[in-house]
Amino acid sequence: MGDEELLLVPTAKRLMFGTAFFAVFFGFELALALTGVLDGWWRVSAPAVFLVALALTATAAWRAARAPWQVRCSAAGVEVRGFEPVAWSALAEIRIGPYRPRWVGFLSAFPSPRGLARVIAFVPGEEGGVPAVSVYDPYARPGRQLSARNAHLARKRYGSPLLVFTHSIDVSPADIAEVLRKLTGVRVIET
């Protein structure tokens, strides 16, 4: 991490949690199927669901770990791999706040422990627009823009459709905030 730029790169150690999670459940379902606890079509379908989920998460982790960087913050602005760079002048502020899961609405009221599941939102200013991209979001398709509905939900939840989830990178949110303050005059807010 240098003073001239900040490269956000996922680490295999952090990405393996999702893979290990589905591997454990696949093993559990397979054991239930082989011991005869599951009968009929459950014997095949229950392990198959977790096998597919395991394959998808392992593939996503492997692809993300191979990429040299996904987000680059430099003196010129922020750039997400595969999209046009956004100049700092196009941003009103940068918010670093808790991750609020969209799939469990009632959990959104509970704050996540500081430093674990955080989200960086690059909030656009009056004249600037940002791409609707969710980086390191386990539910987003890498390298693709969010749908209009998901971009609207991201704006509503975090204030911006350009989001970076910090759960799969080694740099702490506090270190990211410190470097962003050095790189730009844009206000960085930590909640």
Image: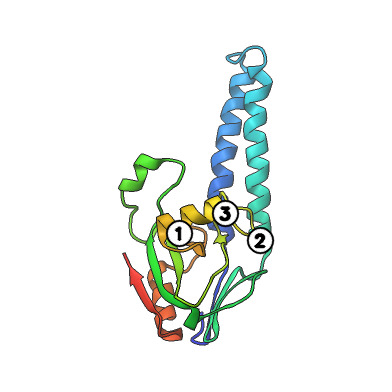
- Of the pair 14 and 152, the residue shown nearer to us: 152
Q: What colouring style does the render use?
A: rainbow
Q: Are marks 3 and 2 in contact (CB under 8 Å)?
A: no
Residue 87: image location, x then y, percent: 53, 81
Q: Quadrant of the C terminus?
A: bottom left
**Element at label 1:** helix
Mark before the other along the chain sequence, 1 or 2: 2
What kind of residue is marked 2? Answer: Gly
Residue 75: image location, x then y, percent: 52, 86
**Element at label 3:** helix
* Disc 3/disc 1 C-alpha distance (Å): 11 Å
Q: Residue at x 41, y 59 (%)?
A: 158
Q: Residue at x 60, y 77 (%)?
A: 85
Q: Quadrant of residue 181?
A: bottom left
Is residue 23 positioned above or below 161 on the image? above
**Element at label 2:** loop
10 Å crowding of disc 3: few (<14), some (14-19), many (20+): few
Q: Residue at x 59, y 38 (%)?
A: 23
Q: Which residue is mark 1?
A: 155
Q: Residue at x 64, y 57 (%)?
A: 142
10 Å crowding of disc 2: few (<14), some (14-19), many (20+): some
